[in-house]
Image (cartoon, coloured by chain):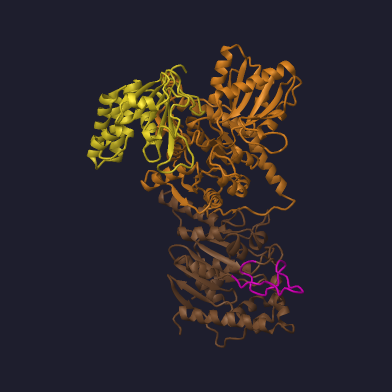
Amino acid sequence: MANIKELSKLEEKFSSGHRACAGCTAPLVVRMLMMAAGETPVVSGSATGCLEVVTTIFPYTAWKGPFIHSAFENSAATVSGVEAAYKSLKKQGKYDKEVKFVAFGGDGGTYDIGFQSLSGAMERGHNMVYVCYNNEAYMNTGIQRSSATPRYGDTTTSPVGQVEPGKKQFPKDMTQIMVAHEIPYVAQGTPGMWNDLITKFQKALTVDGPAFVNVLAPCRLGWAVPSEKAIQIGRDAADVCIWPLYEVVNGEYKITYKPREKKPVEYYLKQQTRYRHLFRPGMESAVEEIQNWVDARWEKLKRLAGEE
Amino acid sequence: MGKLTEIRWHGRGGQGAKTAALLFGDAALSEGKYIQAFPEYGPERTGAPVQSFNRVSEEPIDLHCHVKSPQVVVVLDPTLIGPVDVTAGLPDDGVIIVNTNMSAAEMGTKLNLNGRKLYILDASSIAKETIGRDIPNTPMLGALAKVTGLLSFETLMDDTRKKLEKKFRNKPEVIEGNLKAIERAFNEVKS
Amino acid sequence: MAKVLDEAAMAAAGKNGRGAGVKKALTGNESVAYAMRQINPDVVAAYPITPATEIVQIYSTYVADGLVDTEYVAVESEHSAMSATIGACAAGARSMTATSSQGLALMWEMLYIAAGLRLPIVMPETNRALSAPINIHGDHSDTMGARDAGWLHIFSENSQEAYDNVIQAIRICEHPEVLLPAMVTMDGFIISHAMEVVQVLEDKIVKDFVGTYKPEKYLLDIDNPITVGGLDFTDYYFEHRRSLAEPMFQAKKYILEIAEEYAKISGRKYGLFEEYMMDDAEYAIVVLGSTAGTARLAIDELRAQGVKAGLVKIRVFRPFPYEELAEVLQGCKVVAVMDRSDGLAGFGGPVFGEIRSALCDYEKKPVTVDYVYGLGGRDINVEMIKSVYRDLQEIAATGNKKLVNYLGVRE
């Protein structure tokens, strides 16, 4: 368990002054990861995307530790190369420090264009953590749909029109795909549940081998929520169980947060302008459809975690 | 480049035409010669007609084009004669060596010899008797060395032994079988 | 400093015709893998592709047998191969990969990034045609398409040159005034799969020659953290790209310096390009790769008939030695550029355009024509090359020329 008092004493490894939007949760994901690493140095990499763009505008950098960005679809492959270099130099006695390796990617760089690179790196067993800051669309280029975008999400490439109700497909379950890679650690979190997320990052950094943490990182712009609500809306996602918080350690499922009262999904959807059209007359069944989807998956997760 | 000799091997995928060219090249190198050995690459699979090539010279070899007019042709599988024009490009004073149990006269009628010199060797039988399997490439190596004089008996035996020792460390019978096959080929190849 | 051959050894090496080292029968791929074993890079990240597969396959056996210290990353694609190599090199490790054709095409995006990040990655590249139609044989379409990616391009005529070039490329790329990646090419199948005599140096000699990689700044230097691959807007991008151009202008000098040093350990001396019978040549052809040897035989035959034929074989295509080449070619009557790739530019192949532009400042300059040949591994033989020289004589006599010609194709 993370102790906020101790964490607050740690030196910040990710600087303020970057160009992220007010209320952006992606930098929080990085800060929490760095807190979880504590004194251990971290070499980070990022896919092209919001995080990279707002943190590395030459001649400035928000990264106080070593950082590499090369392209969009290859954060995992790039960092796997860094980790291989570390392994090689260590093996040869040319390097003696203890370092952790983390690759960041948005949902575009993780679920879609970077999917192959990520799968390859996880399969090869590099000792690295992959963190997806999942804001459920291509926010950097102006809110285009990704395979992480939820059904009925209004994006600029799945727009709500006269005949179309937004995105037609349910999101791909990337966390489960990572579980299927049988890597030692897989988890889902969100920065609003900071203690839960930092603890997961600590575990991810400690396991021997690859780890994957899928972090729901609300985007105030793309989800169309007020800046000050961006953290809370992530908590709400956990409370309605549309984004359950759980971890899979060596194949063993554990639900790490069970809401006292499982709120109806409508409570979560209603706060976001990207779902505004669902509350027009005649769209009732869409909300119901999402509720059924959430319920079925929540029950399935509970079964997997042996909680039934 | 007057001393350049070009050789074409005909076989079927799996009979070791490529390996034979590589072994021959390697052995010629150990006699201080310059060599090339390369197969023809296509979609061929086991059993399909394949070719491989050697160039051998006392001087460095600069040519990197196809072998069109080899002085020597080696046929590992007599069933290729007919479906494949094995004498294509072979000059009037060229030499062809065929693995066959036919007599030279009989084989001669099947080939479009036109004065070109034919040598025969029952390499399949030798291989079966010495190595235990129908792998005609090793005895045909012996026949090629004997007929062309490009390689001495000793060099071929030494080099083959060294090569096989790496591969068949725990199977001395395979090494001895192959060497015996070369020896018999040297004695039994005839025109 | 590597052990230097004494004069007696150099003379003895020279007598053998092709310099120093133990003679081995190796294919192009084998000779490159052999050089890589001697270089012993810290990381190799690669994906197999015909006809370069053997390089990574052989290298894997070196790793499996513990003959190298390399961390071998068996990536899931060429894109990841170059990405991981970039990550490893940026981390501070000497890093290599190898590829061909479609694999290079898949790496495209990362080629520019490797150069832009100034990472001295050496990549053997077995030249192969690009699809469609799919074809596994040798032509230069693949690397020619990557000629503006900021990589050095070093072409090899045969297995020996591929071996020598890979070793030299390590030193060239890692030279502090260069710090650019390099691809060392050889013709697919024609060289990659043909066994030839290659003279290999002793492991120790190569090890001393390449030395150890000592980057000034690298990711694993956690006490001096750096950010690699930041974002430039209109205010800095141009300066960064400009700083990339300068080492390309300067690289020729270091390539020649390192060639000089390499000659001392190998007895084999390389230039930016190689001339054959150019002193008094009236008719010259310009080639890259394996065609050069075949062309020399054609020239020997033509010279015997009194034709003043000559050859220029380009070794270093990037940086393009335009001044040096023009100096050698300007005195000829007619020059044919032999392009083993078609630029599909409505103006012949890529080498043609560059040679013509190199000559344009000369008042007296040869007539230049282009021959696109050998696509998809189509054979090029002595007779075909002689036919080109006959064409050149014809052009000189009549003035009638066709700018772009296709050699050895059924029309």
Q: Nearer the viewer, residue A249 or C48?
A: C48
Give left or right: position of A175 versus C146.
Answer: left
Please give the range of residues in magenta.
Answer: A146-171
Residue C213 can be seen, yes or no: yes
Give left or right: position of C247 versus C266.
Answer: right
Q: Main secondary structure of the magenta part?
A: loop
Residue drawn at x 67%, y 54% as measured from the top left: C231
Q: Is residue B60 above or below residue C353?
A: above
Locate residue A136: give its quadrant: bottom right
Q: Is residue C383 above or below residue A97?
A: above
**Rendered colour, chain B:** yellow
Task: Residue C16: give x, y in percent of width and height.
Answer: 42, 20
Q: Nearer the viewer, residue C241 or C85?
A: C85
C106 inside magenta stretch: no
Spot the residue most to the bottom: A261
Q: Is residue A76 above or below residue A263?
A: above
Quadrant (top left, top right, bottom left, bottom right) of the C terminus of chain B: top left
**Rendered colour, chain C:** orange
Locate residue C335: give its quadrant: top right
Task: Residue C50: give x, y in percent of width and height.
Answer: 50, 43
Residue drawn at x 47%, y 63% as measured from the top left: A210
Q: What letter labels the chain drawn in brown?
A: A
